[in-house]
Amino acid sequence: MSNRFTLGDVASAAALCGLSSAEEEELLVQVNKLDEHVSLDLLNQYAEFMTKASGENFVPRIDSCEIPAGRLWYIEPFCGSTTYVLETAERLVVVDSGFPCYAEELKKTLRSLFPDYDSRQKDQILTHMDMDHAGILDGFENIWMSKTSFEDFLGRAKGKPNLRERHPVRTPVYRISSLLSRDISADTTHMRSINTFDPEEGRPLSYIGTLNIEPFSFAVYETSGGHVAGSILLYEKENRLVFTGDTLVNPADMGDGQKAFIALGTAMLGSMNADSAKAKAERAEMFALLDAGGWILCPGHGFPMRYTV
Ligand SMILES: [Fe+2]
């Protein structure tokens, strides 16, 4: 490990993100493990992103459309995943929930959209374990995910490195991201595995089971790990919806903050994907699974796309 940086070099990022002195020490340790191409400037830009849209500055793009079962809402923050809410008379089903550092801001938005949000029966589905998708993990009866992601959360609760942090070269960047955007909650009480079947080795997408949350029935497919291991896609045929996680993003309908953040992440990591060739094969299979007619594709970042087969 080099010692090219000192505490003074990370002080402004640490102060901006409200890190404790122990966290600041860890930030320095991780920064000194970074590849040469990752500059202090990139680190400071990341810290700015994590704080720029906090509090009163949290002004997400919000829209919705009617679906047979009720209404589909999409909420896109300045950075972090698009959060989807399936609203029916019976319940709310949330798909992904942004960054942990914006959890309170997103809850405030949800309470403004759904005045009875706190008392409402609600489930969340996590498309994958990345920190920009798992911001709110409290208040849900069930938090559904693949078995791979569930086991990852169980491991984290015991202090084990997560799926991203097991990557030898990228580990410091992920640790730094977690420190600056607040770690994901380690409470696994309400987390549930979707799997009826294990994914098949070598297949771009494997059917792992059907998740029934009345009135929805999601056919769930696990990817081969192109974006990150344990990622899932959800097909809801009655309502013609596909939730893709980060196997698909929509730069054509995405806020400027999202675009800049993805560019920054790519500069820091080289690619947001663990294996882009696998991700490409997964996308091809994703489209091949669509039957004839109109669909609404709900990407991990950006707004939904209408798509006709
Ligand atoms: Fe993401």
Image (cartoon, rainbow, N blue to C red):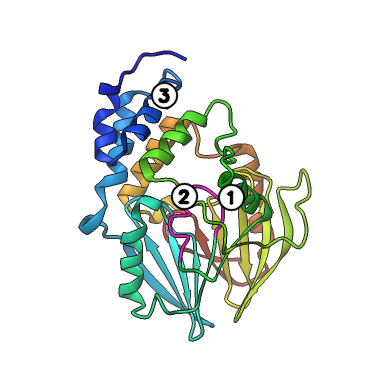
- Quote the CA–CA distance across marks 3 and 2: 20 Å
The reply, left or right, for residue 20 in relation to residue 87 is left
* Magenta stretch bounds: 126-138
**Residue 29 - label:** 3
Please tell me which residue is depicted at 26% across the width and 29% down the height of the picture. 11
**Few, some or many C-alpha atoms within 10 Å of disc 3 (few <14, some 14-19, many ≥20)?**
some
Estimate the x, y position of residue 72 in percent, counting from the top left: 46, 73
Q: Are marks 1 and 2 in contact (CB under 8 Å)?
A: yes
Confirm whether the magenta stretch covers residue 249.
no
Confirm whether the magenta stretch covers residue 137.
yes
Numbered disc 2: secondary structure: loop
**Few, some or many C-alpha atoms within 10 Å of disc 2 (few <14, some 14-19, many ≥20)?**
many
Task: Judge by depth and name the residue closer to the eye, 308 or 20.
Answer: 20
**Residue 153 - label:** 1
Image quarter in which the C terminus is found = bottom right
3 or 2: tag closer to the N-terminus = 3
Q: Is residue 254 above or below residue 1?
A: below
- Quote the CA–CA distance across marks 1 and 2: 9 Å
Q: Is residue 113 above or below residue 304?
A: below
Q: Is residue 295 above or below residue 11?
A: below
**Residue 184 - label:** 2
